[in-house]
Image (cartoon, helix red, strand yellow):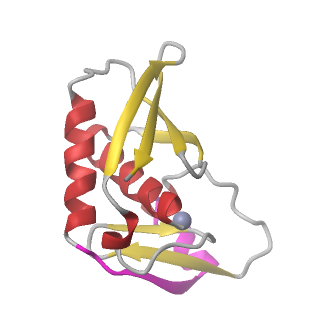
Amino acid sequence: MRMHTSAHILAAVINKELGALITGNQLEEKQSRMDFNVKDFDRSLLKTFEEKANGVIAQGMDVKVSFLEREQALQNSALFRLKDVLPKDLPVLRIVSIGEFDVQADGGTHVKNTAETGKMKIVDFKNKGAENRRIYWELE
Ligand SMILES: [Zn+2]
């Protein structure tokens, strides 16, 4: 739940900073990774990502779940930044919001407040192809 919540935060930071789409992620207990799509990437941004994500964590934002009619949700593409496969037959979608910071359609389980996530540390970075970047992170 901590990792999952931290993935939301990091994805939102990357998206806000670069406008990049998240193309995949793999969450593990100790270390997780996230791929995003951007042509030119300045590695010094990794520090910015970490600082901004930890800012959200430190602010202790409430993580809340609500529900939205499928048709209504589909009108807001910002809700689907993470390339999760959307279940075809769900008439109502589950929406996860992190304070005023981020809102996503999502079926996963999360902590109740970002403060529970623990501090994030970006531990590695790789270029995976011309436009795909991969970040690895851990939680304290
Ligand atoms: Zn989630």
Q: Please state the horizontal and vertical placement of residue 3, each as a whole percent of the image.
A: 50, 57
Tell me which corner region of the image, top left, top right, bottom left or bottom right, holds residue 137: top left
Q: What count of labels does the image hold?
A: 0
Query: Measuring 35% from the left and 61% from the top, which residue is drawn there?
Result: 118
Relative placement, left or right, of 87 versus 104 is right
Q: Position of residue 41 (x, y in %)?
A: 31, 21
Residue placed farthest to the top in the image? 130
With 50 as the anchor, is 111 left or right in this view? right
The answer to which of 77 and 93 lies nearer the viewer is 93
Is residue 128 placed above or below 85 in the rendered structure? Answer: above
Q: What residue is rendered at 49% in x and 83% in y?
A: 65
Furthest residue to the right?
Answer: 89
Q: Residue at x 47, y 67 (%)?
A: 104
Residue 44 percent across, percent down from the top left: 20, 25
Identify the magenta region: 60-77
The quarter of the image holding the N terminus is: bottom right
Q: Quadrant of ligand 1?
A: bottom right
Check the image and name the residue furthest to the front.
140
Please determine whether, in this image, residue 124 is positioned above or below residue 85.
above
Give coordinates of residue 21: x percent, y percent: 45, 41
- Magenta includes 71? yes
Residue at left 55%, top 86%?
67
- Relative to the observer, which residue lies in front, 92 or 2? 2
Q: Measured along the vertical axis of the image, is residue 53 above or below residue 88?
A: above
